[in-house]
Amino acid sequence: MSRPGRRSRGTEHAEEHVDERWMASYMDMVTVLMCLFIVLFAMSTVDQEKFTALKNSLATGFGSVEEGKIDTASGVVVPPDKVSEEGDGFTDAELAVTEVDTLVKLRDQLRSALEAQNLAHAVTFVIDQRGLTIGLIGWETFFQPNSIDLQGEALAVVDTIGPILAASAHNVSVEGHADYRGSPNPFPTDWELSGGRATQVLRRMVESAGFPSGQISAVGYGSARPQRTGETPEDMAFNRRVDIAVLSPQPEAVRELIPDVLANGGKAPAEPAAPAETPATPDKKADAATKEAAAKH
């Protein structure tokens, strides 16, 4: 017979921990508080350099920059006097100097290659705001009269300069010209003749020299753009030519400065001095003083 009022051991153990679910909520709260204090501590130690770079980048993005233009790729502050309208970090004059240096190096490379083949006499070079123009002269030796077929020195010249131009990655315009006398059959006008010769040069550069076809074009100007206006056989022969124009990729504002850079020996042209202020005459000084006094009253 069991004793009254005595509970079993299992029942007594269960009543000691009636409900402990509150401990889970308490532990979650403590964990959250610990994370909060860790974040607050991390925010209290700021890297001033990184903070300044972040501030400048954000200011640039919102268009409110007071410390100069920002190169957001590297976080560098570029001084305002070194920033062009395009925001690339260089002035137009500096870009023009760089472009002239590139064109001069390309010209010298082409000239050296032609001299090694004894072909330098058949080519002229002109650097201007378009870029570098390579003139193929003496077309009696390059083409038969009234013919568009390349021959002799023409093939050697194009095969020599083609790979160099292809490696330069510039866009090229091949431009054919003719003299004013017109063209007999089979060409109706000198437009067809000049355009056909330009196209033959283009084909040779693409098919034999490996020039990218997407970066080259051909155009025929006929007799509309003569280099010489005389009527001698020499003048007419000079106007029967093909020009290979290596086009500058720079904006127009930069290309317009190329002649000035060339005239200045490859350096940026000096900026014009600011006009000196004209000293005020006594009457003007009196007028200024009167206006200032009136403004105060």
Image (cartoon, rainbow, N blue to C red):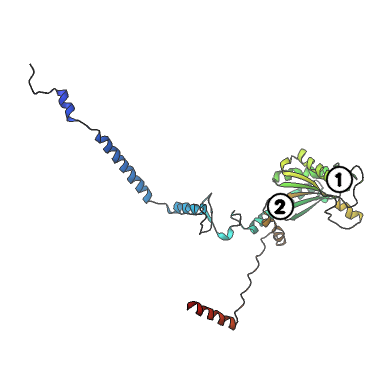
In-front residue for pair 34/117: 34
**Mark 1 element type:** helix
Tell which tag, 2 or 1, sits nearer the viewer: 1
Please report the residue visible at 51 percent of the width from the left and 79 percent of the height from the top. Answer: 294
Please report the residue visible at 85 percent of the width from the left and 47 percent of the height from the top. Answer: 191
Which residue is tagged 2?
103
Q: Quadrant of residue 267?
A: bottom right
Amino acid type at circle 1 is: Leu
Sequence-wise first label, 2 or 1:
2
Which mark, by number, is residue 193? 1
Amino acid type at circle 2 is: Leu
**Which class describes the residues within 10 Å of circle 2: few (<14), some (14-19), or many (20+)?**
many
The answer to whether residue 157 is above or below residue 282 is: above
Point out residue 162 in the picture as x, y percentages from the top left corner. Answer: 76, 43
Is residue 125 in view? Answer: yes
Please report the residue visible at 64 percent of the width from the left and 58 percent of the height from the top. Answer: 92
**Mark 2 element type:** helix
Gap in angstroms between the C-alphas marked 2 and 1: 30 Å
The answer to whether residue 260 is above or below residue 151 is: below
Image quarter (top left, top right, bottom left or bottom right) of the N terminus: top left
Point out residue 47 in the picture as x, y percentages from the top left corner. Answer: 42, 52
Is residue 212 in view? Answer: no
In-front residue for pair 16/268: 16
Please report the residue visible at 80 percent of the width from the left and 51 percent of the height from the top. Answer: 135
Point out residue 200 in the picture as x, y percentages from the top left corner. Answer: 82, 42
Q: Quadrant of residue 264?
A: bottom right
